[in-house]
Amino acid sequence: MTGLSSPPPEDRVQAFQIETAPHRGRLVRLGPVLDQCLERHAYPAPVARVLGETMVLAAALAATLKCDGIFTLQLKGAGPVTLVVADVLSDFDEETHERQIRGYARFDEAALANSVEANRDEAPLAALLGEGWLAFTVDQGPDTERYQGIVALAGDTLAECVTHYFRQSEQLPTGLRLAVARSPEAWRGAALLLQRMPGSGGNGTDSYGGDHHNENQPEDDGQEAWRRAMILMATLTPTELLDPTLNDHDLLYRLFHQDGVRVFSPEAIHAGCRCSRDRVATVLRSLGRAEVDASQQNGIVEVVCEFCSTHYGFDQEQVAGLFSQAGPLVESSSGL
């Protein structure tokens, strides 16, 4: 196994490559970052689990993109859970290489409580979201065209829906194992994503500088190598994926040591929200004065970020300032 020493698995992405086949993967394991998000909102267990899976998967998919920008994974449905969103901000420059993740879910509390199917252990995705769709969005900023892919929710699990998307939309064979669970102490989540790349570049190297030893491999051999990789992945248990004492390298070695596995420098993932008072002010301005005035309660307009639950309050003087020509924001005497 080629690579660097591996610290304990905590809030990180580990990129890897199978040495004897054009298979590239990401192993994501989230601990405190995931627990912080799920516990902040005190979601019911079924909602927390599907949001946790969405966040872990978003981290894995975002890590396959070597560019600045925001990757968003969104589930929308007509069931007790109506919306699940996770996004990852990737910011690369000469000195930093950082990824920040956040997520939230909307649900109908009464509908969820009244659904026996949605509240059982390992409830199928359809019981939680009903009919709906899954969307992938890549936004690299105002100077680039935003990419979005949408597919119907087709499968009992989020993993099945995503592999269906790649099979139908990207035509890229993809294997995925997802696990999210709450121990007595905290929530943990993990994902193992493996993709069969369509072929190496003309220089015979991948984006990480690793050599492809089999770029001229016969198609039958390539299919067999992919089937073997999927069989090996199927042996991976949720307990292994979530075990904090089993480091990344040992887990990957258990699965793929016979074919050789090369690992690369891991990337840390941090919890981070992009909300700010200025952003909230911009949203309020876009709503118009009449709508903002109508939302006042006791002379205060209060906005709560759905991601991080931060409260932003604007008193009457501040609201007037929002719509004045200069648009100054005065410090709030209410302390909100």
Image (tube, helix red, strand yellow):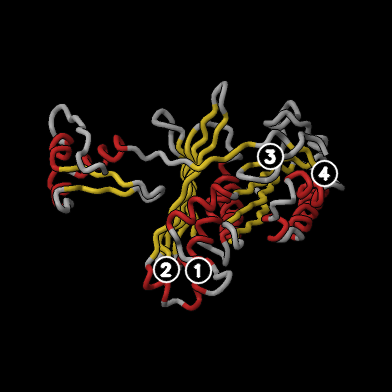
Check disc 4 and report the residue beneath it. 218
Crowdedness of circle 4 by 10 Å Cα count: few (<14), some, many (20+)?
few
Residue bearing mark 2: 79
What element does badge 1 sit on? helix
> In the rendered view, would you say 207 is above or below 280?
above
Amino acid type at mark 4: Pro
Q: Is residue 110 left or right of residue 197?
A: left
Check whether the beta carbons of the residues at disc 2 and disc 1 lie within 8 A of each other: yes
* Image spot of residue 189 (x, y percent): 60, 54
Q: Earlier in the sequence, mark 2 or mark 1?
A: 2
Q: Position of residue 123 (x, y in %)?
A: 55, 70
Residue 150 visible (yes or no):
no
Q: Which three-letter amino acid code belongs to the residue tagged 1?
A: Ala
> Mark 3 vs mark 1: which is more N-terminal?
3
Q: Is residue 115 toward the left or the right of residue 212 in the image? A: left
Residue designated by label 3: 15
Residue topped by disc 1: 126
Mark sitting earlier along the chain (2/4): 2
Tag 2's secondary structure?
Answer: loop
Q: Residues within 10 Å of mark 3 (few under 14, many from 20)?
A: many
C-alpha span from label 1 to label 4: 40 Å
Q: Is residue 294 something one can see in this rendering? A: yes
Residues 147 and 89: in front is 89
Quadrant (top left, top right, bottom left, bottom right) of the C terminus: top left
Q: Earlier in the sequence, mark 1 or mark 4?
A: 1
Q: Position of residue 121 (x, y in %)?
A: 57, 72
Amino acid type of disc 2?
Gly
Residue type at mark 3? Ala
Q: Nearer the viewer, mark 1 or mark 4?
A: 1
Q: Give the mark nearer the N terminus: 2 vs 3.
A: 3
How far apart in space, not on screen, are marks 2 and 4 (Cα)?
46 Å
